[in-house]
Amino acid sequence: MEALATWIQILLPIGGGLWIYGTASDHKRAQFRRWLSEKASASKPYIQRLLLRLGCGAVTVAAGWIVWDSIIGVIDFKSSAAPLSRRDVFLFVLNAFNGICYAVVTATFFGLTIRRNEESGESGRLVVTLNKREYLTLKIVEGADINGLIEALKRGEVCLQMVGTSRGKVKVRVDAPRDLLVLRQSENERLV
């Protein structure tokens, strides 16, 4: 009976929301869809990061299980009192190799799972490739702290570095506060 009450508590708000959406005017539905798309687009990077970390976590668990199974196989081989056969030696070598390889995979994916997000700071790094007749334009983000940007400029926190050239293209690395928008514009866009 408690399970039924739990399902009702879950499904009742969903059903009520669908009923409200279904009985609303076209204007209200359009407003809701616009609001939902804004919220979904704002959460997209976080969802992508979450899915990536969940995938890395799943690979970590699977590879860790293989490492554990390989360690058990090596221990069984080392503690066996029975005469050795070719099969036993082959399984020992296979388990040792699997253990080493999958231990590296486990450590790598564990590191990817728990690594810190590099985008959480107040400044960021961007590498832009510029073609001929393209400009690098710096603009201030709407609602930015102007005084903070001036202080960052005074401290030399806005840096542009040419990191490479090839076939008429230039790669420029930009280290700047997040309130400074970095745009690549063509000659035509700049004239408008």
Image (cartoon, rainbow, N blue to C red):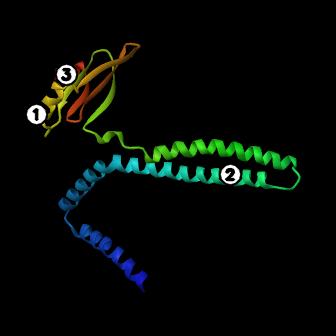
- Write the residue at 28% across / 28% down: 175
- Write the residue at 28% across / 15% down: 133
Outermost left residue: 147
Mark sitting on residue 116: none
Callout 1 touching callout 3 (CB < 8 Å): no
Separation of residues labelled 2 and 1 (CA atoms): 59 Å
| Residue that badge 3 annotates | 190
Mark sitting on residue 71: 2
Task: Identify residue type, mark 1.
Answer: Asn
Q: For the residue carrying disc 1, how many other residues have a C-alpha within 10 Å: few (<14), some (14-19), or many (20+)? A: few
Tell which tag, 2 or 1, sits nearer the viewer: 2
Task: Identify residue type, mark 2.
Answer: Ile
Q: Is residue 52 visible?
A: no
- Write the residue at 57% across / 43% down: 105
Separation of residues labelled 3 and 2 (CA atoms): 63 Å
Residue 132, horizontal then vertical, whole percent: 31, 15
